[in-house]
Image (spheres, rainbow, N blue to C red):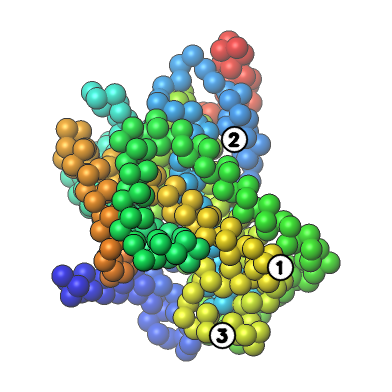
Amino acid sequence: MNEIFSSINSFLEYILFFDILFGQVEGSSIPFLVAWLVCGGVYLTLKMGFINLKMLKHSFHIIKGDYKTKDDKGEISPFRSLTTALSATVGLGNIAGVALAIAIGGPGATFWMIVAGFLGMSLKFTEVTLSLKHREFLPDGTIMGGGMEYLSKGLAEKGMGGFGKILAVIFAIFMIGGAIGGGNTFQVSQALGAVGNEVGFVKESPWIFGVVLATLTGAVILGGITRIAAITSKIVPFMVTIYIATSLWILLSYVSEIPAAFGLIFTEAFAPTAVAGGMIGVIVQGFERAVFSSEAGIGSAPIAHAPARVKYPVRQGMVALYEPFIDTIVVCTMTALVIVITGVWDPGNGFAHLIEGKEGAALTAAAYGSVISWFPTVLSFSIFLFAFSTMISWSYYGERAWVYLFGSKYSAIYKMIFLAFIIMASIVDTGIMANFSFMLILAMALPNILGLYILSGDVKKDLKLYLEKLRSGELDKEAIREK
């Protein structure tokens, strides 16, 4: 079985990380996946008129509930859809991924992570808008949305029904594999390791941890998206507040060094020193880690946004702008500043063994722990919360893909499989499967962004109409009638 996973994993890795420079630039390479996502982000940012800059204020008013109308349809509020999506992205990518990006690509990788987050906002807007535009209200009362729907229905409207259906099925299969691996077994192993370091009996009897975690997860996911959204709407603000507060505490302690840190980040972004691949290497590191962190362009988050109660699909697309903004531009930048200021990214400061072993979480713990002695305990608690919230959101992503393929009446089978893998991951090593599933998650970007290119014109038209109504005051009148 390990050989099968390894073979498929190698094949996907060859496709996704194929060097588009064909090895012609010595010491540098640009993986195909990174180029695919960058081109998609740049194209959609330009096509949508820099919506990632212009509509954040209006988006905030939507999240507050200022634009509710009597014609809104959906299961959960725009805010709860946002927190459900954020619970799947704010996590180990922010803790471990940022540290590794800086350790490998230098401080300059931070700048390119921020750029990637900015471009990712346009990707999120487009894919979430399409998810709401093509969502389906099923007979069982649930809502089907996401890449499966807009790839199949959207392309069918363009006369490419067969092609769209094939892309949708491939996307759904990738989603299920990614949910069970990266969204489940990997999270369990990380949470188990973190909690085991603080609670002795967990390390001695890991199966107990697995049973408890499976019970907690089951209590949430068996209640469907309504219960998942209710829990994430409480967990996400709590864990983000704790992490940001701790980061601010450290940054305020080193406030005089912040300008120099930003200067180093900017300088190293364009003139890196002692980094393999030079400037191209730094850019690749920044974008790779941003993709793992925010999942922009992957097509997972549109499933969480599909049940949002809104009248206009574009409206929820604007809410989704805050995902990469919070996840990458705010949280990742704060983590990066702490790592740069404390100097743990420099192998000469005694952390070379962590860098060589690519132990990103341990590197972040060292950075924060150098200022706050009790932070490793807080980090262990944070990793558990991050892992748990990621699991319940990804369980929903996988369940929607399962329902798309097999129908609503078989939904319970998927949930039982998902919970069984939690217990299994606490007992046996699932590392190879986790690596395999991460390849599947990244592979989702191939059909997803292709669909975004083809369908972006529809989103542009809807955006233009929405902005016209906003400027004319029609949207404010709708909201006033609601009041």
At x 38%, y 77%, the residue is 19
| Circle 3: element type | helix
Q: Which mark is residue 184?
A: none
Residue designated by label 1: 371
Q: Amino acid at mark 1?
A: Val
Disc with the residue nearer the chain's start (2 vs 3): 2
Q: Residues within 10 Å of mark 2 (few under 14, many from 20)?
A: many
Residue designated by label 3: 352
Q: Nearer the viewer, mark 3 or mark 1?
A: 1
Res 229 seen here: yes
Q: Are marks 2 and 3 in contact (CB under 8 Å)?
A: no
Quadrant containing the C terminus in the rendered view: top right
At x 45%, y 16%, the residue is 71
The location of residue 222, given as percent across then percent down, is 30, 36
Q: Nearer the viewer, mark 2 or mark 3?
A: 3
Disc with the residue nearer the chain's start (2 vs 1): 2
| Circle 2: element type | helix
Quadrant containing the N terminus in the rendered view: bottom left
The location of residue 411, given as percent across then percent down, is 21, 37
Q: Amino acid at mark 3?
A: Ala
Q: Which mark is residue 59?
A: 2
| Circle 1: element type | loop
Q: Residues within 10 Å of mark 3 (few under 14, many from 20)?
A: some
The location of residue 14, given as percent across then percent down, is 30, 74
| Mark 2–mark 3 distance (CA, rounded to whole Å) | 43 Å
